[in-house]
Structure formats: structure tokens, C-alpha cells
Amino acid sequence: MNWSPHIAEPHAKEPVMSNVRFIGLDVHAETIAVAAAEPAGEVRSLGVIPNRIESIRKLVKKLGPVKHLRVCYEAGPTGYVVYWQLTGLGVTCEVVAPTLVPVKAGDRVKTDRRDALKLARSYRAGDLTPVWVPDAAHEALRDLVRAREAAKKDQLRARHRLGKFLLRHGRRPPTTMKAWTQAHVAWVKSAVHFEQAAQEATLLDYIHEVDHVAARIGRLEAAIDTAVQTAPARLRAVIDAWQALRGIALVSRPSPSPRKSASSHGLPSHGSSWDIAAQLRASTRAASGPAAAVLRTPAMPIFVASSSKPPGPIDTDQPWAPAYGNARRPPAPR
């Protein structure tokens, strides 16, 4: 048996060439700090440039032939604009996961220059983990889903304001009815009034806000239906595969009950509520994307279309394929 030590390649993606330069970018809204790991081993800062396409184009020309460049930057609030600009110029670029960037113990000094140097050094060593970059159609659908989720949060706040306003003044329906049903809303609009003009104006404003958010959600849901119908075939296949899960539709509204949430996701629903809640929390460690969000926030509606996984091919011969939407096997239970 050969016990000779294995020497790892400096970069896991491809063989290292003597003329390849690994570039680290610390991207912000207005500026980009640039650092380069040179072929000879030196890692040096190249300064700061404006975050504009003209400046990026000049930087690429200054760095040399694009076939010898490997660029990376951390995923963040600036999105994937720089990625598309660099790839449009022919540069190989990767967006890396910021939480998986190696950090030295005791290294508490954080500046744009140091961050760019660390990215370039780690990128050359193969210590960074790239994330999947969505295409234009997938990113557009994700933006629409985020807008709808924001509208649902606004609806919850608007309902809370109106409900607490009525509770503060002792206004309760004459009969037992579930809150925010058609009967409840009709009672609020027709039977609740105040003698003081200021309070009446407050009531009307709260009611108007509830109606406004409801109409907003309706428009966004209709837009999502249209967007899904016109989405690329591969993305529609992922959405259809997610809907094969029990209790998941195009707009999934999981049950707020831990027992019903566990049942809808194939988990044992017997035992105490504490045991079921513990099973749900444990299951989120192996789940990701919408499934994990459904389990973690069962009262929050979530769209199947918001999957963070790339729309890969679906192997229908595998029993787990409908649940995961691409050809990656789910993690084994611990």
C-alpha cells in the first residue's frame, strides 16, 4: 500500500497555470476594492475603482488577457450585476458564499482592502465555495415572490393595527366569528363606528390599509401565475416537482399547527406538541429552500417558485426527485 502523502492542487476547479491571475473583489454600491494573487505567489492590492461598467471594463483591459483571469466576489446586497458584467466581457467569474470564507482566529480588522486580499488569496488556494447564479428569468420570478412575501408581512401588520385598535376600545363582534373572514370584515365596516371624528378617521384609515394590502396581494399572485406560465421549461419543471409534495401548491399556505405541519411533510404526528415541534426543528437541518421555510415558519405563505436551487434535470426514476427538483440526492438522516 502506498502511504505517500497526497499533495492537493492549489485550486480545486482546474489545473493551475503559471500565467493565471486570481482576482478578489470587495463589491459595494459605489466602489469595488480589487486585489490580485499573482502567478509568482505575490498577493497585492490593486486599489479601489468605481462600481461602474466603464471602470470594470478598464480594469479587465489592465489586468491582461481574459482567458488568464479568474475573478470572484462575495454574494451580497449588490446582487449579480458585477457577475453579468464580467462574464459579458468574457471573464471567468464566480460568486462565493460569504459565510464560508475562511477567517483566521483573532483577525478582527476588516477593511475593503483586506477583504479583497483575503478573497484573492483564498480563491487561489481553492478555499472558497461558489454559489449558483440565477439566470434573468429565475431572478425575475424570485423578485416577484419576494414582493408578494413583503406584501403578506404588510398585511399582517395592517390587520394587527386594526385589531388592536378595536380591542383597545372594547369593540367586539356580537357573535363568535373567526377574525378576518368575510363576515368579520363586513362587521367591522358596517357595525363599528365612533362618536369622535378623529377615531372614526383612524378606523377608516386602518380599514383602507387592510383593503389596499389585500388588493396588492391579489395583483401579485395573478402576476406570479402569469410569470410561471411563461417561465422557461426547466424552471416550470422544478415548480411542478415541488408541487408533488403533499400540501404544497403554487402558493403554499402551511398549517399553523405543528401537528398538521408535521403530517403534511411526512413526519410522525403523534405525541405531544413539544415532541412534534422538536421533530420539525430537527427536520429543517436537512431541508433547504422553500421546504425549510415552510417548516420553520408554518404561518408564512411561501411560493414553490421561490426555490433557491438551480433548475437542474429531474430524474423521475428516483423517489426523491419530485421533492427536490434536481438530480441531487437529499442528505441522509443522522
Image (cartoon, rainbow, N blue to C red):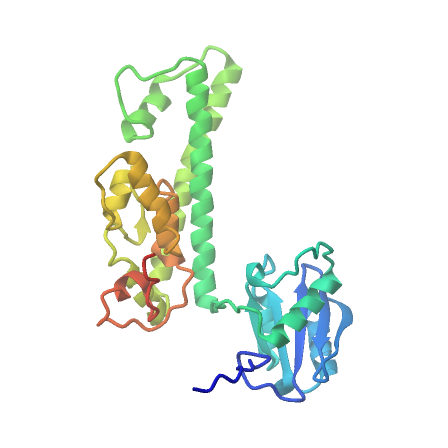
Residue found farthest to the bottom: 18
Identified at 67% across, 75% down, the residue is 23
Provide residue 172's location: percent of width, then percent of height: 35, 16
Which image quadrant is residue 289 in? bottom left
Q: Is any atom of residue 71 visible in this view?
A: no
Q: Is residue 88 above or below residue 107?
A: below
Question: Is 61 situated left or right of 246 in this image?
Answer: right
Figure check: 251 above or below 73: above
The residue lying at 23 percent from left, 42 percent from top is: 269
Q: Quadrant of the C terminus?
A: bottom left
**Front-lying residue, 144 or 296:** 296
Of the 4 image quadrants, the one containing the N terminus is: bottom left
Q: Is residue 52 left or right of residue 319?
A: right
Residue at 70% across, 84% down: 39
Image label count: 0
The image position of residue 277, as x and y in percent, is: 33, 40
Tell which residue pokes out farthest to the top in this image. Answer: 195
| Camera-nearest residue between 199 and 115 | 115
Taking 78 as reference, is 126 above or below it? below
Quadrant in which residue 109 is drawn: bottom right
**Left/right of residue 289 with respect to residue 123 in the rendered view:** left
* Residue 211 seen in this snapshot: yes
Question: At 28% across and 52% down in the image, what residue appears?
Answer: 248
Q: Residue 266 location in percent, x, y?
A: 23, 51
- Return the residue nearer the eye: 126 or 81: 126
